[in-house]
Image (cartoon, rainbow, N blue to C red):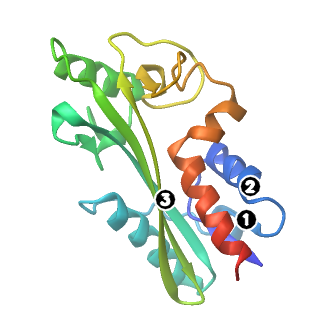
Amino acid sequence: MELIFATSNKHKLSEAKGIIGNQISLVSPESLGIFDSIPEDEPTLEGNALFKARYLWQINKMNVFADDTGLEVEALNGSPGVKSARYASEECDAGLNMQKLLKELNGVKNRKARFRTVIALILDGREYLFEGIVNGTILENKSGTGGFGYDPLFLPDGYTKTLAELTFEEKNLISHRGLALRKLAEFLKTI
């Protein structure tokens, strides 16, 4: 079966292929000649994931899945949440986003946070949702150069390394996207 992953991010596509395996052929919209920039204006992660999946489903009626991820910080009432990528500016600048987050948490003792990914799958016209969550703490200083986004600030519960310090394989085992993708992969094995 061929399945579109609604992303232009090659890193995410590679990660998904590694988890889903060879039973499903994952393709990007670009490989099908679709270069549209799909808006992410919905107020929830679920809404954004569903909007992206529905958008591509309407174009070609091919099975598709899309994801959205947010960092939810307890002391900030779940912010930046759905606005994680554009927290500091519309340019999706990870450095500025981390800077803003650290400024807002300056002097705050409760630094509990979680990364949450929601995957929306449209399979033969039916919609399904899968969620992955990793809990942790926001550090006061960045540590590590791997990963992307807020990874250098996020220390997963039970670990002594940030997501940016973990190897690709270690991160995939515990990451929010990895967990959601494994749930998707298990579901796809049942069809």
Q: Is residue 33 visible?
A: no
Mark 3 near mark 1, Cβ–Cβ under 8 Å? no
Mark 1 near mark 2, Cβ–Cβ under 8 Å? yes
Q: Residue 62's spot in the image, x, y percent?
A: 63, 82
Say which quarter of the image contains residue 46.
Answer: bottom left
Residue type indicated by callout 1: Leu
The residue at 37%/38% (across/down) is 114
Q: Residue 141's spot in the image, x, y percent?
A: 37, 10
Residue beneath disc 1: 26
The residue at 26%/32% (across/down) is 88
- The answer to whether 52 is drawn above or below residue 137 in the figure is below
Measured in 3D between alpha carbons, the distance from the residue under mark 3 to the one under mark 2, in whole angstroms, is 14 Å
Q: Residue 165's spot in the image, x, y percent?
A: 59, 18
Residue 17, numbered label: 2
- Image check: 30 left or right of 89? right
N-terminal of the pair, mark 3 or mark 1, is: 1
N-terminal of the pair, mark 3 or mark 2, is: 2
N-terminal of the pair, mark 1 or mark 2, is: 2
Residue type indicated by callout 3: Asp
The kind of secondary structure element at disc 2 is helix
The residue at 54%/17% (across/down) is 161
The residue at 45%/31% (across/down) is 149
- Image check: 4 left or right of 47? right
Residue 67, numbered label: 3
Q: Residue 133's spot in the image, x, y percent?
A: 44, 47
The residue closer to the viewer here, 147 or 41, is 147
- Image check: 181 left or right of 25? left
Residue extending farthest front: 158
Residue type indicated by callout 2: Lys
Measured in 3D between alpha carbons, the distance from the residue under mark 3 to the one under mark 1, in whole angstroms, is 14 Å
